[in-house]
Image: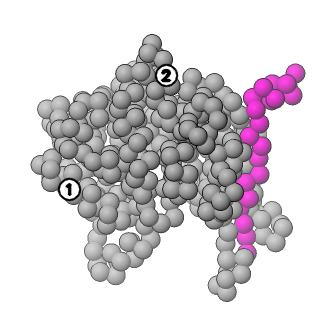
Amino acid sequence: MPPVLARVERNGIVESVHRGHVVQADVAGTPIRTAGDPDLVVTLRSAVKPFTLAALVEAGGVEAFALSPAELALMTGSHSGEDVHVRTLQAIFRRSGLPQSLLGCGAEGMPLDALTAARLARDGERPGPLRHMCSGQHAAFLLLAKLAGWQPADYWRPEHPVSGAIRAVVGRAFGIAPDRLVLAIDGCGIDTYAVPLRAVARAFAFLADPGAVGRHDPRSSLVPAMITIRDAMLAHPEMVGGSRDRLDTALMKALPGRVVCKSGSEALRGIGLVPGPRLAGPATGIASKIEDGDGRERAARAVGVEALRQAGVIDAPSLRALARYHRPSERDPHGRLTAETIADFELAPVGELLGRRE
């Protein structure tokens, strides 16, 4: 049975628990610390977005469409649908000459930002596809189609050349032959991919420090593109998530230049630990997955912050800044604390675990 990663307590009474898996691995994919099963197969969902963008960057899309770092960051993100995200996308479509009507991501359940959604409802405005959290990624796919001279309509279909190009770049980034990738359909209508959790950690270690791979590594051709993508995410974290209540954004702001992260639906998160003065040793990646999907996002937040704390990345001031994510709380109508979600696991060194089994 998977270990308990977080428990929900009400006045000291454990009301529920969330089980799951966490693995920290280096750029070669060697597990360093783990809780649970590092070989659990997960669907990447939106956690794959930084890697799919590499297809457009490699093809010369930054130069062809004069894409700014903020625009690139938006294309890696699951944005909140705030006005700043919409304006950024509108500028991309104006310069490209592509009609926004080609977006195939839909608009159901969007925007994610509660204040923006309330304002739109008050004003009687129906959100369009630009407000969808995946519209940045879909825009990148459309730009790739135009750049390559492919028919942009139906770019989201598995048989479209765009889908083939994305599969090829994801295969390189994750070290899996494109024809061996296990495919599924994401909520926004495009392909998603199933990989072991340790492969997610490996990929985010690569994103954190693309130059760490050797020249004979199949990923070496992706290094320039991934550096561009990583730097865009680090410089514009609000484009990866949003200005309010988004953990990916909050982590990158609280730990500037030290972590690069992207979540996926059903409580998957990948975090790359960027080498530098505050990180001893080479880049690593942390991947976490809450088994029950964590519909309220309380366990995924607590576990993500706690994993970074145990990895030695978060100092005391940063932990205070992230306190509401580290220990998500609930309050009654009078402001009294009613319940808390508490991360409760040990991210143990793999060598220590092997010793215990012997």
Q: Is residue 273 left or right of residue 138?
A: right
Dot 2 or dot 1: first in sequence order is 1
Image position of 175 with respect to 75: above or below: above
Residue behind mark 1: 91
Name which residue type carries label 2. Answer: Val
Q: Residue at x 71, y 81 (%)?
A: 336
Q: Which residues are magenta?
A: 338-358
Q: Position of residue 111 (x, y in %)?
A: 38, 64
Q: Residues within 10 Å of mark 2 (few under 14, many from 20)?
A: some
Q: Residues within 10 Å of mark 1 (few under 14, many from 20)?
A: few
Q: Position of residue 306 (x, y in %)?
A: 69, 51
Q: Secondary structure at mark 2?
A: loop
Q: Residue at x 35, y 57 (%)?
A: 132
Q: Residue at x 29, y 80 (%)?
A: 123
Q: Is residue 52 visible?
A: no
Q: Which quadrant is home to the N terminus?
A: top right
